[in-house]
Structure formats: structure tokens, C-alpha cells
Amino acid sequence: MPEIKQLKNNTSLLVLSACETGIGQIVKGEGVFGLGRAFFIAGTHILASYWKVSDQSTQQLISYFYNFMLSENKTFATSLQLAKKNLIQSYNFSHPYYWSPFVLIKG
């Protein structure tokens, strides 16, 4: 974390699509200390997951997310919402296990 804080950060979005990237150690009076904390403090939006995720559904969700964001010029929040809706409407990944662990944390 100290190294990240020292970087000149102009990142507007950090995508942490691996398992449990949105969790961390809770420190009284400070909040959650996790992988994205230094970026969050710097004002970066973070897309992270709260529990173990499926590789296949994560790949599909992130693909949808980037497509909505880059091809259709949607906001981060709208892109995530639409990506989740696409998974909900799919046959293989409609169960909340596949799409609900992902959250956007606004920096």
C-alpha cells in the first residue's frame, strides 16, 4: 500500500476481478484495509468482488462491463448494472452467485 500511495495516480477505475478482492481486514476507526484501499483514498473507483467467483461468469461479466463502458460510453455504475442484467438473463449465470459478488466502490 505505501508504494501505491507514492505513485502519481491518474487512474479513474481499478478492476479487481479475482476472488474476494473487495474484502480486507477491518481496523477500528479506519475501516477496511484491503487491496484497493490506497487507490480508493486517491479517488479511484474500484470494481471488486466480495466472495469466491466463477472464472467463466467473471469473464463474461467483465466483458459485458467493458463493452458497455467503452463501446456504448456508459458510466461505470450503469455498465456494471447492465452487465449484471445480461448475466441474470443468461441461462448459465442467472443465479446470484455469479453476478452479485461484484460491487463498484466509488473513490
Image (cartoon, rainbow, N blue to C red):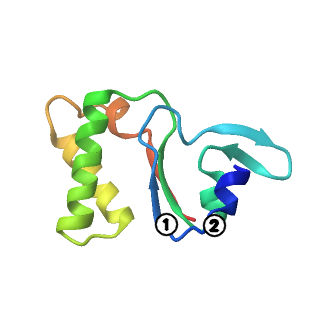
Of the image marks 1 and 2, the number of the one nearer the N terminus: 1
- Which image quadrant is residue 67 in? bottom left
- Which image quadrant is residue 57 in? top left
Image mark for residue 11 = 1
Position of residue 98 in the picture relative to residue 89 (left or right): right
Give the amino acid type for the residue marked by disc 1 in the picture. Thr
Give the amino acid type for the residue marked by disc 2 in the picture. Ala
Q: Residue at x 33, y 27 (%)?
A: 54
Compared to 19, does 34 lie above or below?
below
Classify the position of the C terminus by image quarter: bottom right
Q: Residue at x 85, y 52 (%)?
A: 29
Q: Position of residue 49 (x, y in %)?
A: 47, 40
10 Å neighbourhood of mark 1: few (<14), some, or many (≥20)? Answer: few
Secondary structure beneath disc 2?
A: loop
Q: Position of residue 19 (x, y in %)?
A: 47, 31
Labelled pair 1, 2 in contact (Cβ < 8 Å): yes
Residue beneath label 2, please? 42
Marks 1 and 2 sit apart, C-alpha to C-alpha, by 9 Å
Compared to 45, does 103 lie above or below?
above
Q: Nearer the viewer, residue 38 or 29?
A: 38
Q: Residue at x 37, y 64 (%)?
A: 76
10 Å neighbourhood of mark 2: few (<14), some, or many (≥20)? Answer: some
Q: Position of residue 105 (x, y in %)?
A: 53, 57
Image mark for residue 104 = none
- Which image quadrant is residue 96 in? top left
Q: Residue at x 34, y 70 (%)?
A: 75
Q: Position of residue 100 (x, y in %)?
A: 39, 40
